[in-house]
DNA sequence: TTAAAACATGTAATAAATTACATGATTAAA
DNA sequence: TTTAATCATGTAATTTATTACATGTTTTAA
């Protein structure tokens, strides 16, 4: 029952690696972790406040320039315990992937539907671009093989995202090729 | 801007195939479409009411037995137009897949972490079961090749879900094999 | 025959997520 | 030097989704 509110665990997990500001945490969702979870700053700031009230994080104020105050959040011992409890417990619920495009496909009755080619091509482009972006990330984040050992989880999920997109792109390509000629 | 509230389009798409009750619509999320979108009856009944107020669907009451009243919903012409507008328009936003397990992995630092094997094995089991279930579905829903032509979208998404799970299972297996021996 | 499972429809309360509102500082580039 | 981009933090309003509450019928299996 204590396993809901995933966002709090993600925040704790990130703070467990290093102290970060709310702004830093928000940006983290732009990269790999954004492939598997999304959150805006309007969710993150209130959540940080709650985590602090509950004693899982603390913050110190640092100055950036003359007046700009940043709140640098640190995980506490009890926060770390909460995090490791979440990681250690099973994860039996496979949440459904929301994919609007696939839903649209579902409502297409025949493989002669004139909209199919354009629809599949658009997705092919989008997913190819995403794949290329992820592959670039892998090279920038892990230029050497040694890095993957130190940040194994990061390496795994990036590689998983790449594999997933590779499958998607190949599936789109095959599906396009199997379409009857117009 | 008129492209939010995906649920309404899914309902229209299903009603476009045949008239259905709220209960039927709810059950539809237990199968293939549940792989790509989830909704509970507490969302569906109010949405049907709104769609009717807006003139996109109508309902007739049928009796099941002596007193049990069922509301059988039909799509209207304007509902059908709304549906086809949604399908025809581009789908440029790739929403993030929420995957709690992958997030947990992200926070694991080294490939010597003693929790890794159990975590990966649990997911291997879960995704293998899901894959087996989807493969069975394919056989029951499309026992003959001809069916796939008549319900092409249905065939595509089921086949896509199978491909996706196949990738996931293989990735888990490979990752498990590459783990250092304890 | 009776009890459980499935059918059937709704609302209320809560939680989670997105979008919009609101403000200001610092840095990099034109 | 000024302006745009980025850094930085918050709240409010709205939408979406889940869980809980609430009730009753019909069918299937023990």
Image (tube, coloured by chain):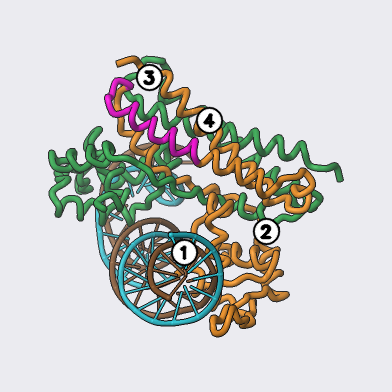
Chain colours: A orange, B green, C cyan, D brown
Of the two numbered discs 1 and 4 in the rendering, the one whose residue sits closer to the viewer: 1
Residue A153 is left or right of residue A95, and the answer is right
Q: Position of residue A160 (x, y in %)?
A: 62, 42
* Residue marked by disc 3: A179
Tell me the distance, in whole angstroms, between the alpha carbons under discs 2 and 4. 28 Å
Tell me the distance, in whole angstroms, between the alpha carbons under discs 1 and 4. 31 Å
In this orientation, does residue A94 appear? yes
Determine whether the residue tagged by mark 3 lies in a helix, strand or loop.
Answer: loop
Q: Earlier in the sequence, mark 3 or mark 2?
A: 2
Which chain is indicated by disc 1? A
Residue at image coords 23%, 36%: B16
Q: Which residues are magenta?
A: A111-129
* Residue marked by disc 4: B163
Tell me the number on the disc at residue A40: 1
* Residue marked by disc 2: A87
Which chain is indicated by disc 2? A
Q: Is residue B79 magenta?
A: no
Cβ atoms at labels 3 and 4 below 8 Å apart: no
| Label 3 environment density (alpha carbons within 10 Å; few <14, some 14–19, many ≥20) | few
Which chain is indicated by disc 3? A
Question: Which image quadrant is residue B34 in?
Answer: top left
In this orientation, does residue B74 appear? no
Residue at image coords 48%, 68%: A41
Which chain is indicated by disc 4? B
Q: Earlier in the sequence, mark 1 or mark 3?
A: 1
Determine whether the residue tagged by mark 4 lies in a helix, strand or loop.
Answer: helix
**Are callouts 1 and 3 both on one chain?**
yes
| Label 1 environment density (alpha carbons within 10 Å; few <14, some 14–19, many ≥20) | few
Count all numbered tags in the image, as a single digit: 4
**Are callouts 3 and 2 both on one chain?**
yes
Q: Is residue A121 magenta?
A: yes
């Amino acid at each position: 029952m204590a396993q809901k509110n995933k966002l709090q665990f993600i925040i704790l997990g990130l703070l467990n690696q290093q102290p970060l500001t709310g702004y830093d945490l928000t940006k983290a969702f732009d990269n790999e972790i954004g492939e598997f979870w999304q959150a805006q700053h309007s969710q993150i700031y209130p959540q940080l406040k709650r985590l602090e009230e509950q004693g899982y994080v603390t913050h110190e104020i640092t100055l950036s320039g003359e007046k700009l105050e940043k709140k640098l959040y640190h995980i506490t011992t009890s926060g770390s315990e909460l995090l490791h409890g979440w990681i250690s417990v099973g994860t039996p619920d496979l949440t459904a992937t929301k994919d609007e495009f696939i839903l649209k496909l579902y409502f297409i009755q025949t493989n002669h539907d004139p909209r199919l080619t354009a629809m599949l091509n658009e997705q092919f482009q989008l997913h190819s671009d995403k794949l290329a972006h992820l592959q670039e990330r892998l090279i920038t984040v892990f230029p050497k093989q040694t890095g993957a050992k130190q940040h194994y989880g990061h390496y795994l999920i990036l590689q998983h995202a790449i594999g997933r997109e590779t499958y998607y792109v190949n599936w789109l390509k095959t599906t396009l090729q199997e379409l009857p000629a117009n």
